[in-house]
Amino acid sequence: MEPTQKRGRGRILTALGFGFFIDSAEDVALPMLWPAVRTTLGLSYAQLGYIDSIRVIFQTFSGPFWGMLADRYNRKWILVIGTGIWGLWTSVCGFATDYWQLLIVRVIACIGLGCLYPAAFSILADSFGPKRRGRAMGTISAIGMFGIVAGALAFGEVIGISENGWRIGFIGLGLMSVLSGLVIAVLVKDPVRGAAEPELESIITDESAARFRFSIKGVRELLGVKTVLVNFLQGIFMLTTINALATYYVTWLVDDRGFSESDAPLFFGAVVVALAVGNFVGGVVGDRAYQRWPKYGRAAVSQISIAVALPAMWYLFSQATSTQSILICSLVAGFFLDWTRRGAMQPMVQSAVRPELRSTATWH
């Protein structure tokens, strides 16, 4: 690999990793700040569930529209708009004075986050070849997971400032989103679509790639790709599980398992670290499996992920009662849960569709 090319990939991983870092903090901002928000606005945990569920729905289904834009136009600037400038809506959450204001502004803010996965993973697919995509996707996802830990620590500090500390948390997070947009604008160069494919890397140019722009007809083509449909359906179940854990895991530990309010977040932090490490390891394992068994390697990694994580989660929520069993099951489930996305399905989708349709195909 040429030094210039290596530096370019390093800048892309740095910038997109920072974007995922802030995005992950935004995902858990409301659940982490909810005790203070609830007190100030007089809300309930049920209303938290409504806001977060609606947020997930809008954010998920905005992805294809952002993907179409990213496939049609410059992906870097789509990210700058969606994750950077749009982040100002997160700051507006800090000025909400009732439930409906918070719900509406929170949903608008998270629609912008729907652009991150489609545009970012498409850029990675055109920067890293098929044998290295899992590791690249796992790396920025792992960096993003640590955003949850950093966010939890930062939100805990701002809540302690005053009864309106949660407002400072949202405003500060929105400004950090704008900063992530600036970092992407400075460090990322939108790669030529298809440039990382072994068959095209030595001959593709911006001019030749421009002839293969996204068109609405491509959506029908994607609906006929079984890998894309399986990825979408599996992603719905995975996102539901991960969001439920992120939203209610701490509350479950306190209310159902008798943990203290100070100990429960520490367990949550340990699970997030396991998720982060698992994202990276899953990406590496997926790449190794693909290199050894190109046709079935990534699919096998996905099955291993599900075969280990689901039983661990079943035992965790139905049988585990001791501190040791809860911790072990939580770490095992967290470590293996995302292998199926980072090491298998997402790299497979990027390889299964044409370069000009990759962003649209990445729906989560």
Image (cartoon, rainbow, N blue to C red):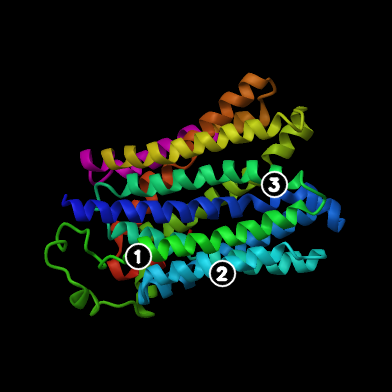
Q: Name the amino acid type tagged 1.
A: Arg
Tell me: residue 322, above or below residue 51: above
**Number of marks present in the image shown:** 3
Out of 28 and 157, give the one closest to the viewer: 157
Range of magenta residues: 289-310
Secondary-structure class at tag 1: helix
In this rendering, which labeled residue sits more in front, label 2 or label 1?
2
- Residue extending farthest to the right is 42
Out of 353 and 225, give the one closest to the viewer: 353
- Quarter occupied by residue 135: top left
The residue at which mark 2 appears reads as: 86
The residue at which mark 3 appears reads as: 32
Q: Alpha-carbon distance for marks 2 and 1?
A: 23 Å
Question: Which label belongs to residue 135?
Answer: none
Q: Name the amino acid type tagged 2.
A: Trp
Q: Position of residue 56 (x, y in %)?
A: 61, 59
Residue at image coords 35%, 63%: 225
Q: Which of the two labelled residues, at mark 2 and mark 3, occupies the earlier sequence position?
A: 3
